[in-house]
Image: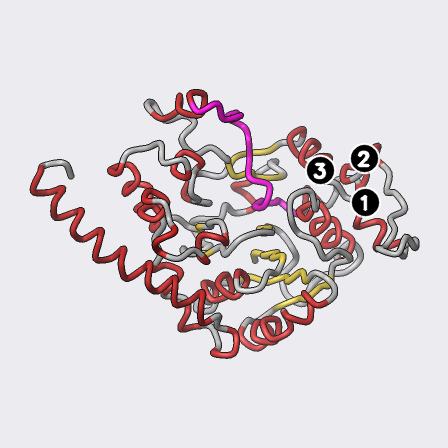
Amino acid sequence: MIDIIILTEEFNTEMTLSSLINNSENFRIHLFNRRGILAENMEPTINWAMKNFREVYSYQTPFAFRGTGSNRMARVLLQFKEHWKDKAPKGAPIERVIVHTKGPRIFNGKFEGNVPTVKAMGDKVVYFSRKHQYFDHPFYGNYYKILELDAKKDDHEEDFLLLNWKLFKAKPNSYFFRGGKATREKNANGEPLHDTDSFILSANDTEIFRHMKRMNHGYMPLYFDMRLDELIKKESIGPKDTMNHHTMMRKAFSINIDQTYLFFDYYDMSTLCYMATPWDMWSNLIDDIPLNLRREGINERILQKADKQKRYLRKVVEAGYLLGKI
């Protein structure tokens, strides 16, 4: 059994759920919904998930903001940990947990054979996704330094984790807090919040990641979480390797991109970012999303980019073969 935690976002979560809708493997979905109007807007999506997946749990978070500095990973993890500390879900026990807190992630492959078993995870508590995918590349590895990017080999993505839950749940809650203690938080009116809300809002990303790095941890292989690397965003690698990146994303177990790229019009995209992204992997998911949840304007842009890319890459490949470059 695999548990998937998703911090819900309009449009993004619909894409993620659509990528799982035809997967018959054993997994549970945990939807964390931000409070206020955001939670209300997600109600139709939650209802769709409840009707189409075997086991779905829905939670309301005590926070609404999810941007930079929102500590969303720490808060969601702590709320999940607290919720299940003295109870168990209906089916199998919680063993392996995938946590996703940002972006229109697609689960492209089967869990079996891609997600390590509990036995294979051994004594490792957490697996991180490396942030800089070309750091060890014999040619492009130096580009991070040339471009003056603050890049280290062990830098990791802060919105995607794989956890060995049996080992992680045994860790003390003090790991989530600055100074090891929760603080009393206040609402927008300056009034003290309830104990539970204050407890969750005290969780801090920097603190939990610092403690995770001290635990026995590992790093996911590239195919487990493929994204657009910073070098591609800065158009620093060649067209041939950009197409190779496109192929790697297409074959990966899980892929994710910045939400804004889905919103961009074809003519607003930089060339390499456009070429590296397999747009049809998102456009193919639209048909599995209920009509009342489809975003007409965004979907039209995705379909346009997918169609133009298909025609463009065909011409590039044909020319490459003729020139002996591919």
The CA span between labels 1 and 3 is 11 Å
- Give the x, y percent position of residue 33: 68, 62
| Count of numbered tags | 3
Give the residue drawn at x 56%, y 46%.
160
Amino acid type at mark 2: Arg
Give yes or no for residue 161 being in the magenta stretch. yes
In terms of sequence position, does the residue under pointer 3 or pointer 2 come before the other?
A: 2
Q: Residues within 10 Å of mark 2 (few under 14, many from 20)?
A: some
Point out the residue furthest to the front here.
267
Query: Bounds of the magenta span?
Result: 147-165
Amino acid type at mark 3: Ile
Secondary structure under tag 2 reads helix
Q: Residues within 10 Å of mark 1 (few under 14, many from 20)?
A: many
Secondary structure under tag 1 reads loop
Amino acid type at mark 1: Ser
- Give the x, y percent position of residue 317: 16, 47
In terms of sequence position, does the residue under pointer 1 or pointer 3 come before the other?
A: 1
Quadrant of the image containing the N terminus? bottom right
Q: Write down the residue under mark 2.
A: 178
Label 1 or label 3, whichever lies nearer to me, is 1
Give the residue drawn at x 66%, y 66%.
57
The CA span between labels 3 and 2 is 9 Å
Q: Write down the residue under mark 3.
A: 208
Labels 2 & 1 near each other (Cβ < 8 A): yes
Nearest to the observer: residue 36 or residue 282: 36
